[in-house]
Image (spheres, grey):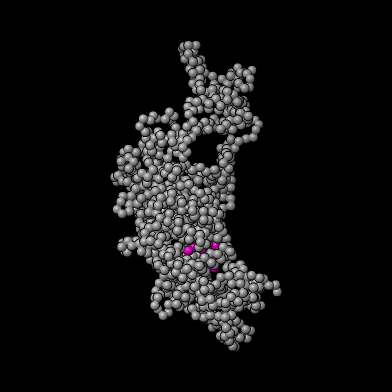
Amino acid sequence: MTSLSLKTKISLNPNNSALHFNAPNKLQHTNFPKKGKIKIKVTCSATDQPPQQQQQQTYSKKKRNASEGDKGIDPVGFLNKVGITHKPLAQFLRERHKELKNRKDEIFKRFLNLMEFSTGYEIVGMHRNVEHRVDFMDWAPGARYCALVGDFNGWSPTENCAREGHLGHDDYGYWFIILEDKLREGEKPDELYFQQYNYVDDFDKGDSGVSIQEIFKRANDEYWEPGEDRFLKNRFELPAKLYEQLFGPNGPQTLQELEEMPDAQTTYKAWKEQHKDDLPSNLPSYDVIDNGKDYDVFNVASDPRWQEKFRSKEPPIPYWLETRKGRKAWLKKYTPGIPHGSKYRVYFNTPDGPLERIPAWATYVQPDADGKEAFAIHWEPSPEFAYKWRNTRPKVPKSLRIYECHVGISGSKPKISSFNEFTEKVLPHVKEAGYNVIQLFGVVEHKDYFTVGYRVTNLYAVSSRYGTPDDFKRLVDEAHGLGLLVFLDIVHSYSAADQMVGLSQFDGSNDCYFHTGKRGFHKYWGTRMFKYDDLDVLHFLLSNLNWWVVEYQIDGFQFHSLSSMIYTHNGFASLTGDLEEYCNQYVDKDALLYLILANEILHALHPNIITIAEDATYYPGLCEPTTQGGLGFDYFLNLSASEMWLSFLENTPDHEWSMSKIVSTLVGNGQYSDKMIMYAENHNQSISGGRSFAEILFGEISEHSPDTNNLLLRGCSLHKMIRLITFTIGGHAYLNFMGNEFGHPKRVEFPMPSNNFSFSLANRHWDLLANRLHSNLYSFDQELMKLDENAKVLLRGSPSVHHVNDAKMLIVDLFALVNSCLHVCLQGNMLRIFTRGGITQRHCIDTEVICYMRGPLVFIFNFHPTDSYEDYSVGVEEAGEYQIILNTDESKFGGQGLIKEHQYLQRTISKRVDGLRNCIEVPLPSRTAQVYKLSRILRI
């Protein structure tokens, strides 16, 4: 309800895709000349410049401006960077950049700059005006009549309506309604028509008792210098003199007496001659210079001192503010036109009849749950009850350890948890676990709880089932106080198809916010697809992103399901990876332009914001700068890793796991590894009809089974190893879903008709942390986070993977040597092959070992279910001593403790292994992993 005040102003060159910031006091688009003789040339007729020359200068100026605007911009820059020479894709990117410039030109015809374009929440929606009223605005181009109905006016569709002819409806389809505060009984209207009130402070300057007449008189006496207010006080002086000369008693009485009126030039010369002896202070501060030419062009020269004085003159706003009164004076005279907590809806009259809707920009909504009719709630708490921010935003860490959460299922009890419960119980756990970011999904208002929050109905409202807007502000504030960033999973790729509470057919038409026909619906989910080529839809969506950052201090966004919006087939077509598929007729270019604008605006207005792309198709240029043809995201999710692990656990025996597939899937494209967010499992594995890894590993173990201990050891070992290699092998960020850090054994199932609306699986069993197995897994996850905190694992460069033993690859390699080999000998884990050219060493073909280095750290994994090794040779770059700093087999992590304390320190041996000059021979039990750190360098 408060207006937004930004100290930084933004201007945008329409030919440039980057936002430019200017100092607040710097005048824009105005060039003032230096002191001296100033000439302002006023042209009243055709100029003396030839049209052809003028056209050439105009063309060269446009060309120069265009080149300056495109400086540093290369629409195909990232293609050249990665060495892609696909001509259709390059042509597509150039055309997309051209359309982006055209789209910005369209925006600048209606909005001053992109900042104004993305701050629509300042005027659209419900806002308290300083002049004792509440203003409401919403966009409904298909409606013929608009009114607000609610419990504050008895749900009357005629009492508070948009008044035609009183700025009630504009040409773009925006409706404007004023809700005047009501005078209390016995009170008189304000003496000043435009009386302003301060709704935060009890008293203001206007409560001092000084009358308005005294303030205005003082303003006239102090603000104007002698003579400056002459025509303000006597505005009819000049026309009165002219009237007296023409129609006064001494004026002409007949047409014959009315002489021909002289032209302006003659009159001015006569006046100049008449006042040639006057003092300079009595003469005007400007002069007209006639150069003697016939055409009517004059040079108007003004006094530089007068011009500078005029420019430095400040408007008399301080005097006007002295009339503003405080909150107590407002409450004494008025009652709010729409009190805090009032229920309301917007009423439209459409060609198909009347209808009621929840306002699209409503910030607090009660959806139609339990058979109740949906309504918006006016949220305007008094200053003493409104939430006040206490903590500042933490600095953005260089490596992100993200804890993914859902507020509703965060409690232990079978019910919907609240924001306050999450703040008190979950946030301390996240801090203790060692994460530095929480990512919330399902927070934005949605009608159906079982949709997990992805079928959003009201984009500007937090879900009322968890609490109030102030409760959510407290959650974010407390998270910031603990040093945690807060990310939001935002759904702008589609919207719920609900009409009463959602945006579908908002104004009675089918094409208000969404496409018409089949394109307006998701092919498989039935949700509505936004119309990204409409400026008002872009205005709505871009302002929504800015709203969450400004109002709730959100630190970043994960853009959900980009493939649904990028492609007209919603990402469900079979993609082969051919670059043609990223630029054909099934690509929605308008959706890509929206993503580019979103990233440009967010990063310009909020430099520390983080944007994450969730795209299963890995569209080219996701994390490349927009100036180089990319979409501008900071990170992208590696969705393939969790699918691979799930496939191994459910469908592949342990001894058949492919080490090469693990490495290739987790490392991904090495060029973008620093932009990749890794995760072993997120909420999709637990919620989308699947099972969590812990449920797969531990769910079918019987307590009385004779093989229980071995099964528990297997599950515990794989749970730790999967997380360790996923966390450390690539990317500068890692994500974990709430509860999976301690092996939550149950999947998530929201209450729905199929389970009789049961909450038994819609919670988290935090009491399992007291269980030894889950406590051990939690302790290991804590050590994993400390590994990054202390050794900066995620900040290291791309891993040097130099040792991958894959059975199939080694068998092929062995058959290739069979014709030339003289003798084969198995020594430990080494296969020694004697050939005519010398001795070749290969690791044993049944090993499942991966080794890689990141900086001074060496990571060794043995995924084999049974084989252990006493002295396994692994190549290293530096000669020295290597110390184990993390071991998955430690007893405190639920392991067997097979590696003894004296084996934790290993010294290199001068032997070439894995193409490296030095190696270490380490103990390597089955299903274990160790992290070695170079503790001492030996110079040889």
The front one of 203 and 530 is 203
Rendered view: 359 above or below 654: above
Task: Judge left or right: residue 387 versus residue 628.
Answer: left
The residue lying at 36 percent from left, 30 percent from top is: 186
Most extreme residue toward the front is 770
Q: Is residue 419 above or below residue 878?
A: above
- Residue 114 in view here: yes
Q: Residue at x 46, y 51 (%)?
A: 474
Which one is nearer the viewer's eye here, 221 or 703? 703
902 lies left or right of 618: right
| Closer to us: 455 or 66 | 455
Image quadrant containing the N terminus: top left
**Residue 171 placed where, x, y %?**
40, 40
Image quadrant occupied by the C terminus: bottom right
Instruction: Tell me residue 583's x, y (percent).
Output: 47, 59
All told, the count of numbered labels is 0
Q: Quadrant of residue 263?
A: top right
Q: Is residue 870 left or right of residue 337?
A: right
The magenta stretch is: 729-736
Question: Which residue sits at x=48%, y=11%?
Answer: 249
Percent position of residue 229, x then y? 54, 24
Residue 133, magenta (yes or no): no
Is residue 256 visible in the rendered structure shown here? no
